[in-house]
Amino acid sequence: MRNILILFIFSVFVSGCCSSKIELTGCKHSSGWCNEIRDISSESWKYAQLSKNVYKDDYKFDVSAFFESLEVFSNDKIDYYSELFKDKSNGDLVLVFRGTDSFEDFRTGNNPFKQRQNDYALKIFDEIRNKYGSENYIVAGHSLGGGISIHVSLNRENVVAFSFNGSPVFRNKKNFKNKRYSIVENGEILKIVRLLGKEANQLYTSIGCSKGNLISQHDMKSLALCLTQIGAIKNHQARESLKTNNIDFKYKK
């Protein structure tokens, strides 16, 4: 994984549109987090947990109180994996893409000349929409998975995207005006890559959740834990999730 990420820095070509900055408010809150950070954490924490869970790692957040897994989609030839969930609270359908988990992932997903996973993800998304018939969807993912989620939201209507430490592998072919949220750790390795090009139109949030090197700060578990902690300041479901996963709440309400 480390070598794949380092190689990616030297090989990726990026494109898209830049996003404007907004001024942070309410930063004297007792938690130390500004209003905008608390808001995006409250909205994104559960998609961050799902983005961690689709990896092959042993650690999984218990999301059974909030989501039902509907289908798994995999293609061993390109090492693609995604999972479709249904939000039990509102019926939303959420398609979550796994990030880079092998060299084959890098070759088929981050290859700047032919990103096969992008095309395959659109194919899967179209099949899901035809089968389930829902008008609005949420897509999410970490690293490569985050980049794929942005790609789908740019190229299909009525798709909200949540990207975590996302890789800039998207291609802006149709530029649908969907909501896109990109949440990144301040010091993570792909932030360097994103500085070399332009991002999609989105709400881009850089957050100082953890300390460490470029690789360790790319970790999805750490980011998901941080967003859940901050989200729990105002979101009762996030607070419930901490209890379910035996995680102590760090902040006073």
Image (cartoon, rainbow, N blue to C red):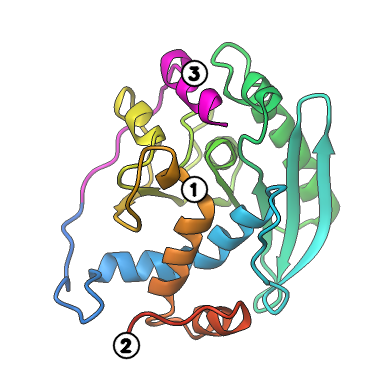
Q: CA distance from mark 1 to mark 3?
A: 17 Å
Is residue 118 placed above or below 225 in the rendered structure?
above
- The image position of residue 39, as x and y in percent, is 35, 70
Q: CA distance from mark 2 to mark 1?
A: 26 Å
Q: Is residue 4 magenta?
A: yes
Ranked by sequence position, the earlier of labels 1 and 3 is 3
The reply to whether residue 170 is visible in this rendering is: no
Residue beneath the point at 43% across and 82% down: 249
Q: Which mark is residue 219?
A: 1
Q: Quadrant of residue 196?
A: top left
Give the residue type that dot 3 points to: Leu
Left or right, residue 26 beside residue 57: left
Residue beneath the point at 48% across and 48% down: 164
Badge 2 crowding class, 10 Å Cα cut-off, few under 14, some 14 to 19, many 20 or more, is few
Ranked by sequence position, the earlier of labels 3 and 2 is 3
Is residue 60 placed above or below 35 in the rendered structure?
above
Q: Which range is magenta?
A: 1-21
